[in-house]
Amino acid sequence: MRILGLTGSIGMGKSTTAKMFEEAGVPVYDADATVHRLYEGEAVAAIEAAFPGTTVNGKVDRTLLSPRVVHDAEAMKRLERIVHPMLRAHHQKFLDDAEKSGAPVAVVDVPLLYETGGESRVDAVVVVTTAPDVQRERILARDGMTPEKLDAILAKQLPDAEKRRRADFVVDTSHGLDPVRVRIHEILEQVVKLPIRRS
């Protein structure tokens, strides 16, 4: 089985692309969705113990947790020490299940793939991109988003040009969904022919 890493900066259309891989019958692991589930179950007690007052009705409240960790590197490390081992276990179970199901390709959707060195754990990387003005328009249309918030998010992410340069495959979402579907089928045909390179 080949593992495809799917990544791309905010507002590029990565979630839509991930859904299209699923529509094509490919198992997709969504790191963000897994964190959401952990924040509603498995990680709640440990996070409340480390950051008292950040859970409400048995769930982590991100609006309470975020201000406690976002500008405090030590607090962020403490949170990562709780969440990352759980994430790794879920990720491994997903890969084991995908392998057992006989899937030729599995996709792991990881927003900060390059930023966290995740490319060494996949066989090829797909970067989702779009025109910069389309990206800004999509993001600024989101609830609660401001140009300042957007700039702060982008500052933490590897520039799009660098991601594209390092990618094995690029999916451009600027021109609607049909070209994306075509591109996904091309990628799936090619990736099974690639050598397994994950370490």
Image (cartoon, helix red, strand yellow):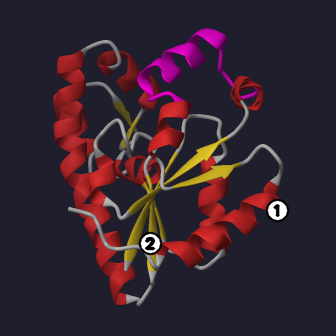
188 in relation to 177, above or below = below
Which residue sits at x=54%, y=74%?
A: 190
Q: In this view, does 87 lie to the left or right of 171?
A: left
Q: What stretch is highlighted in magenta?
A: 141-160
Question: Residue at label 2?
Answer: 106
SS state under label 2: strand
Neighbours of disc 1 within 10 Å: few (<14), some (14-19), many (20+): few
Residue 51 visible? The answer is: no
Picture quadrant where residue 17 is located: bottom right
112 in relation to 199, above or below = above
SS state under label 1: helix
Disc 2 marks a residue whose amino acid type is Ala
- Pick whichever, 99 or 142, lies toward us: 99
Neighbours of disc 2 within 10 Å: few (<14), some (14-19), many (20+): many
Quarter the N terminus occupies: bottom left
Mark 1 to mark 2: distance in Å? 22 Å
Disc 1 marks a residue whose amino acid type is Asp
Which residue sits at x=45%, y=83%?
A: 104
Q: Of marks 1 and 2, which one's residue comes earlier in the chain?
A: 2
- Pick whichever, 112 or 93, lies toward us: 112
Question: Residue at label 1?
Answer: 178
